[in-house]
Amino acid sequence: MCGEAVVRDEPGTRTRPALSPSRAADFKQCPLLYRFRAIDRLPEPPSTAQLRGSVVHAALEQLYGLPPARRGHDAAMALVAPAWEQLVAGQPALATALGPAEQAEMLDEARALLSGYYRLEDPTRFDPQSCELRVEVELADGTLLRGYIDRIDVAPTGELRVVDYKTGKAPPAARALAEFKALFQMKFYAVALLRSRGVLPTRLRLIYLADGELLDYSPEREELLRFEKTLMAIWRAIQSAGATGDFRSRPSRLCEWCPHQQHCPEFGGTPPPYPGWPAVAAIEPAGPANSRGDMTELLC
């Protein structure tokens, strides 16, 4: 069974500013989007895809909390409704996010994704070391990394495997960028584990449940060291923009799916007054149900 539980920050709490995979991706995509999400913390109504992904993640976490022999297909199906109820209990506003018919359809889709999971892995044959693990580590230049890892597996010989579940499909126009973001996210976690545990992850595994595909990637140490410098550079750029409030919009095809068009100059909107770079702030805002509220949620 998963040996480490995660303790999440309560919504609205303030912690030291940190870089997360989703916020780093936001800044690279559009600095103004980063500001809206990380500093202004503008609300974003959860999409059905995000809620479905949250249910699947919660059900898989609960599944791996059971003894291996009890992790069969029927057990996973039985965990879907309780997973939704748990999410609603933590965020009561979700209770009205979907109508009865939409909710039933969403839960059926979650069950279908979980059913397909059994064609990719057999959860009765291994025990993860951790599920939904919160990781936080400070790099040499002071950059603080923070994130949540879906699953960590450790082989008897000590090799580390980092696993992330993807439950949706990006639109064709955004597919390539979504895949880039997914690999960016996995390298982020690999750097965090390398610095916090001193162990190079042997394998990074992306499980695309909607497509029924596994993507395994084996990073090299030098590659991760270069990527670490990239993360440091991103954080320096964020801090520089934060000091002046100069978070500029960066138009792209992804603007079509941006939930903040009404505040964006590219669409004739006006950003809210800049509140200033917070001395202490939760840079990773609470997402719809699992702190994953960006465009990459389409593949989470």
Image (cartoon, grey):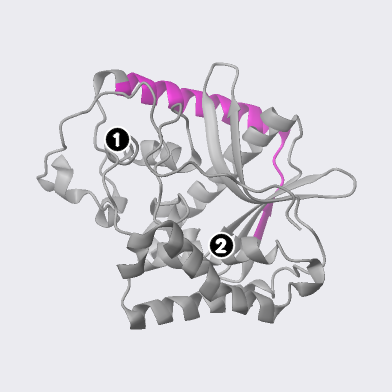
Left or right side of 151 for 15 = left
Left or right side of 119 for 247 = left
Residue shown at the point (44%, 62%) measured from the top left: 89
Closest to the observer, 248 or 276: 276
Instruction: Give the residues drawn in magenta, as a range.
Output: 215-242
Residue behind mark 2: 58
Closest to the observer, 8 or 42: 8
Residue shown at the point (22%, 49%) measured from the top left: 260
Q: Main secondary structure of the magenta part?
A: helix
Q: CA distance from mark 2 to mark 1?
A: 29 Å
Helix, strand, or loop for circle 1? helix
Label 1: few (<14), some (14–19) or many (≥20) C-alpha neighbours in 10 Å:
many
| Extreme residue toward the top, this view | 141
Asked whether 118 falls inside the magenta stretch, the response is no
Q: Position of residue 221 (x, y in %)?
A: 72, 32
Q: Position of residue 186 (x, y in %)?
A: 60, 45
